[in-house]
Image: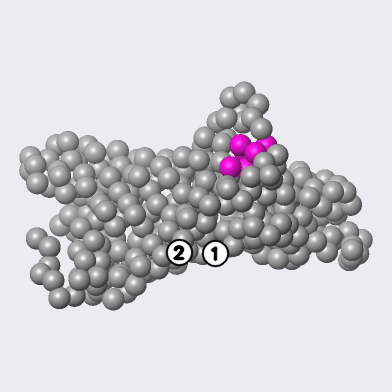
Amino acid sequence: MIFSNNSHLFPHTFFLTGIPGVTAVHIWISLPFCFMFLLAVIGNSVLLFLIQRERSLHQPMFFFLAMLSFVDLVLSLSALPKMLAIFWFGATAINFHSCLSQKFFIHAFSAMESGVLEAMALDRFVAICNPLCYATILNPVVVAKIGGLVVLRGVGLTISFPSLAHQLPYCGSHTIAYTYCEHMAVVKLACGATTVDNLYAFAVAISLGVDDVAFIAYSYGKIVRTVMHSSSPESCGKAGSTCTAHVCVILFFYGPGFLSVAMQLFGPPIASAFKVILANLYLLFPPALDPIVYGVKTKQIHDQLFRVLTPNQIDPI
């Protein structure tokens, strides 16, 4: 069914294909997807619980970590339930406005995650390169402003995605060759001019993929330089331990995206199924693996988890 409004054609329903070409094994593909979804929901919920519960974790570093966990949780809940419904029940249909809503949440919270990673890089930069002024520079007011800016930027950059897509006419296929409503995949179905949509999406991708990575790289470059010139092996080890977790998380988030772009621009032609799998990894890896990385590499986190799980035991040394 198609509705007409303001001379545009709006489909009542889109259809998500899942992973093209491998529908026969969707049930097997769903198993690791489901496992990562459970890891994401449980792991990020535990991190949020621990940070909220323990006053000693009410510090800038853990405030940003709580933001990251919340963003990862929303990303997982925005994409994974529908993916699993496609794999398990063949529920490929999605309402047009539900599709636009899913697209907004996925892109907005992906942008927020990039912003949170920037904030975490800034936090580590100040903590390691200017430790004596850490509490002054990153006071609660400044931290709250940074958090608010991350949210406003994420929403501001992506709020136009659903509105731009809503103005396009869709008079051809309504099948999206993805497991979720990705902006460019939806725009490709339009039968009108999509230049504005393409240019805006490209500008947002450049802003997030280049500017944010450049800032993070600069911050960690200064951190490495400071650590290399440090005369204290203990401080070097502590800085290296905390920064390793952040670097792993950054690689989980940006790695699949950059790999997908690089393979499409410079590599041999790749099957649609592989493109969709890379896009899924971009959403699956960070939410599932971030809590594990921080739980293992951050002493304060695993100490608090130990206290919760073993309340009658002696605290670990």
Q: Position of residue 263 (x, y in %)?
A: 57, 30
- Above or below, 239 against 105 in this view is above
Q: Which mark is residue 42?
A: none
Q: Residue at x 46, y 40 (%)?
A: 255
Snapshot colouring = one colour
Report the quarter where the N terminus lies.
bottom right
In front here: 198 or 4?
Answer: 4
Contact (Cβ within 8 Å) of mark 2 with mark 1: yes
Can the viewer see residue 43?
Answer: yes
Q: Which mark is residue 77?
A: 1
| Secondary structure type for disc 2 | helix
Say whether disc 2 or disc 1 marks the residue closer to the N-terminus: 2
Is residue 276 inside the magenta stretch? Answer: yes
Q: Position of residue 92 (x, y in %)?
A: 73, 57
Q: Residue at x 30, y 38 (%)?
A: 221
What amino acid is labelled 2 in the image? Val
Q: CA distance from mark 2 to mark 1?
A: 8 Å
> Label 2 belongs to which residue?
41
Q: Residue at x 56, y 36 (%)?
A: 260
The boundaries of the magenta stretch are: 272-277
The chief SS type of the magenta part is helix
